[in-house]
Image (cartoon, rainbow, N blue to C red):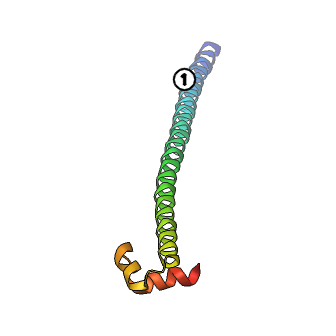
Amino acid sequence: MNATIKQIDEERRLRDMEMLHVYQMREMALADYTSGMNNARREGFAIGDKRGEQRGIAIGKKQGIAIGEQRGIAKIVVNLRRLGLPVEEIAKYSQLSVEEVISILNNE
């Protein structure tokens, strides 16, 4: 009888060890998966940040160019007016409407 009990205890220990091994393997797999997902997330954020920065720079350049063009046209309008040209001619040469020319002259 003692031999039977010892055998049963040994079988239980072996099953418990197998279950522990399965549990440990599952835990390692989950840790690997979580680590991989976190790395992918960080890489995704880095790529997104870089793309966002590049987009922002491109938009900023376009806006800067547009503002520069507007300021250049405004200077030309003011200088043409100082030379004594009528508003209608300034509008014609600058390809602006008479209202736009007047607005620029009023804001200068």
Q: Quadrant of residue 28?
A: top right
**Residue of label 1:** 18
State the SS at label 1: helix
Residue 105 in the image: state x and y as whole percent. 53, 81
On screen, 87 above or below 3?
A: below
- Which residue is the extreme one toward the front? 83
Which amino acid does the dot numbered 1 rest on? Glu
Number of numbered labels in the structure image = 1
Answer with left or right where residue 92 lies relative to residue 45.
Answer: left
On screen, 32 above or below 70?
A: above
Residue 26 in the image: state x and y as whole percent. 53, 32
Answer with left or right where residue 58 lies relative to residue 14.
Answer: left
Q: Residues within 10 Å of mark 1 (few under 14, many from 20)?
A: few
Who is closer to the viewer here, 69 or 4? 69
On screen, 21 above or below 70?
A: above
Who is closer to the viewer here, 65 or 45? 65
Who is closer to the viewer here, 31 or 85? 85
Which residue sits at x=46%, y=69%?
Answer: 73
Quarter placement of the N terminus: top right
Which residue sits at x=61%, y=21%?
Answer: 13
